Image (cartoon, rainbow, N blue to C red):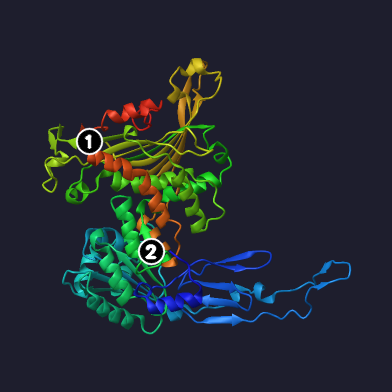
């Protein structure tokens, strides 16, 4: 999108409906620049402010608030050219760049956050969004003044919404003493407004109700679109033009899927940007909010023992594994339109891969991290059909229980070729990762449930103990496992001597099991991401160019699978998946880490 100066953008906004007064930039992170350093500012609530330096003044600005100007001190002794040609610059003290930000007290009493869950009667809202909001409230993470509105087509009163929501709320394990009281207080902040997703009149009515609860304070508004993708644009248009914040920020959380391929994703992005700026759009991938995924960069960049090993010189292959031990079960109609590659691999696993493989970012700023992720995605080799294996689960009887096939789902066509399993080999063509296979596999109705990253290191050159270990390369090498779920853990497989008089080697784990090490409950991914959206932290959300790069990798092979009507390999419900996935790994001299005797 083009960048306009303040004067030109104001003119454009007044003359074009695409840039209405509702389309605002709301930057959470700003910088105080000086000749020697930049001071990073971040206010937790109600918003953020920035110090902007220009040639005339320094502007301290709060989102949606008026601008305070601090006039610079005039330079009474400018630089002079001496006779011998030497430039003489007298010392200058810039007082306005040395502002102590802590002295500025922005009154949180005068701001509020209104959170509207669009699609409030759906399963995602009931099972994830409302419970996550309550958990944030229970932990004291929400601002003092906040209101939650449910918006959906269903006819419902405030009391009926509260009854529905109360059935899904739970309290933290470590703070149960005031659970009932906290629930009652939270539910008092929850309200409901029925309406159509494409009705500006209904959203105007919502806007009126929101203003009543905002009570004249600086109003910040967050809309969570928990609705099917085919009505995203209608809802965004109505929210932007009829229910945007008048004097604060407006942000919109968009759930996946972000299209079905490059073309549909780009069309969705263009449509969203008719009504929103890029920094108002929060594309959520809940896997990026998982505790172990967020710990990935900490593990790598804050531990000296790992960063030097994080390259083709020491790593033989990397595996990203996602397995569910149940089928589509009620989601067959939705799933059949997308399949496992679009549902899991193109977003969840690819985002984790980008975080894993990226170079060290300049800082922890959202844009710096996302810049490095985009570089990884753009360096990846186009995915070939030969490097992809697809599968679909079939009926299977085990222990006297008959498990259904994918096509037994009444919402799925009998001749469906949609894969419920996929494995792929990907490569990053850059100096760090050249030649290292990155293997992904994801599937439903498998033998267990897990999501993990497995890093298999190279064997020790000239290993003195080869005769004690044997020729099995997988048993002779180290492996780092990051288990995202369930039972979050990080463990490193090492070789060591078994106690005794003989020389017998054993493989053991150096294990960090989160449940044993930490007594605090791990927050749900939606809690972290909702809090980040409220605070304007975009590090764990997907930028539009990230999305474009991700789709460009998978779109050609997806089209080829569908155009050639490739028949997936069938595998029994509850098995380890198609045999073809093992042949794919073997082609690159890799054995899947989750199928051995030691997992």
| Residue 67 visible in the picture | yes
Q: Residue at x 67, y 79 (%)?
A: 72
| Residue 420 visible in the picture | no
Image quadrant in which the N terminus is located = bottom left
Q: Residue at x 29, y 75 (%)?
A: 188
At which x and y percent is residue 36? Answer: 68, 64
Which residue matches tag 2?
281
Q: Secondary structure at mark 2?
A: strand
Q: Secondary structure at mark 1?
A: loop
In three-dimensional space, the C-alpha distance between marks 1 and 2, rounded to whole angstroms, equals: 36 Å
Q: Residue at x 16, y 41 (%)?
A: 416
Camera-nearest residue between 202 and 524: 202
At which x and y percent is residue 586? Answer: 37, 25
Is 350 displayed left or right of 308 in the figure?
A: left
At which x and y percent is residue 266? Answer: 34, 56
Camera-nearest residue between 384 and 404: 384
Crowding near the residue tagged with mark 1, few <14, some 14–19, many ≥20 C-alpha atoms within 10 Å: few
Give the total of numbered labels: 2
Q: Which mark is residue 522?
A: none
Crowding near the residue tagged with mark 2, few <14, some 14–19, many ≥20 C-alpha atoms within 10 Å: many
Q: Is residue 233 above or below residue 455?
A: below
Which of the two discs, 1 and 2, sits closer to the camera? 1
Which residue matches tag 1?
566
Image quadrant in which the C terminus is located = top left
Camera-nearest residue between 588 and 210: 588
Is 275 displayed left or right of 228 in the figure?
A: right
């Amino acid at each position: 999108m083009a960048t306009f100066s303040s004067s030109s953008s104001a003119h454009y906004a007044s003359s074009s409906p695409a840039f209405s007064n509702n389309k605002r930039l709301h930057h959470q992170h700003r910088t105080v620049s000086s000749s020697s350093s930049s001071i990073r500012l971040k206010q937790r609530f109600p918003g953020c402010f920035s110090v902007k330096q220009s040639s005339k003044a320094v502007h301290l600005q709060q989102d949606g608030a008026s601008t305070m100007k601090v006039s610079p001190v005039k330079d009474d002794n400018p630089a002079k050219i001496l006779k011998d040609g030497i430039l003489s610059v007298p010392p200058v003290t810039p007082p306005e760049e040395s502002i102590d930000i802590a002295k500025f007290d922005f009154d949180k009493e005068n701001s509020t956050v209104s959170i509207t869950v669009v699609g409030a009667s759906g399963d995602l809202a009931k099972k994830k969004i409302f419970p996550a909001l309550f958990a944030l409230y229970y932990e004291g993470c929400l601002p003092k003044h906040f209101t939650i509105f449910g918006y959906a087509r269903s006819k419902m009163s405030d009391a009926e919404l509260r009854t529905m929501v109360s059935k899904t709320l739970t309290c933290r394990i470590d703070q149960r003493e005031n659970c009932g009281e906290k629930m009652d207080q939270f539910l008092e902040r929850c309200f409901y407004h029925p309406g159509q997703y494409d009705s500006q009149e209904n959203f105007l009515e919502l806007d009126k109700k929101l203003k009543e609860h905002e009570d004249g304070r600086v109003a910040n508004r967050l809309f969570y679109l928990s609705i099917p993708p085919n009505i995203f644009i209608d809802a965004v248009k109505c929210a932007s033009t009829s229910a945007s914040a008048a004097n604060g920020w407006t942000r919109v959380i968009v759930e996946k899927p972000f299209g079905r391929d490059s073309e549909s994703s780009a069309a969705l992005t263009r449509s969203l940007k008719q009504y929103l700026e890029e920094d108002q759009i929060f594309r959520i991938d809940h896997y990026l909010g998982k505790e172990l995924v967020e710990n990935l960069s900490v593990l790598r960049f804050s531990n000296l023992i790992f960063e030097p090993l994080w390259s083709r010189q020491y790593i033989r292959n990397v595996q990203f594994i996602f397995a569910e031990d149940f089928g589509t079960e009620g989601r067959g109609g939705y799933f059949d339109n997308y399949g496992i590659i679009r549902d899991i691999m193109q977003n969840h696993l690819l985002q984790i891969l980008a975080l894993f493989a990226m170079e060290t970012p300049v800082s922890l700023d959202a844009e710096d991290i996302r810049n490095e992720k985009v570089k990884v995605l753009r360096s990846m080799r186009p995915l070939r059909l030969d490097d992809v294996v697809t599968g679909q689960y079939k009926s299977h009887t085990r222990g006297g229980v008959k498990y259904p096939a994918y096509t037994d789902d009444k919402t799925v066509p009998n001749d469906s070729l949609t894969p419920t399993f996929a494995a792929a080999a990907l490569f990053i063509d850059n100096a760090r990762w050249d030649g290292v296979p990155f293997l992904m596999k994801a599937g439903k109705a498998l033998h267990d449930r897990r999501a993990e990253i497995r890093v298999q290191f190279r064997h020790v050159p000239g290993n003195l103990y080869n005769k004690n270990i044997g020729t099995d390369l997988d048993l002779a090498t180290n492996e780092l496992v990051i288990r995202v779920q369930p039972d979050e853990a990080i463990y490193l497989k090492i070789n060591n001597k078994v106690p005794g008089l003989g020389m017998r080697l054993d493989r053991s784990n150096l294990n960090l099991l989160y449940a044993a090490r930490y007594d605090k409950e791990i927050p749900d991914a939606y809690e972290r991401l909702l809090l980040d959206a409220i605070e304007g932290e975009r590090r764990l959300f997907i930028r539009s160019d990230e999305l474009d790069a991700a789709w460009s990798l998978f779109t050609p092979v997806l089209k080829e699978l569908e155009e050639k009507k490739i028949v997936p390999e069938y595998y029994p419900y509850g098995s380890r998946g198609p045999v073809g996935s093992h042949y794919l790994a073997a082609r690159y001299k890799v054995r899947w880490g989750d199928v051995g005797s030691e997992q």
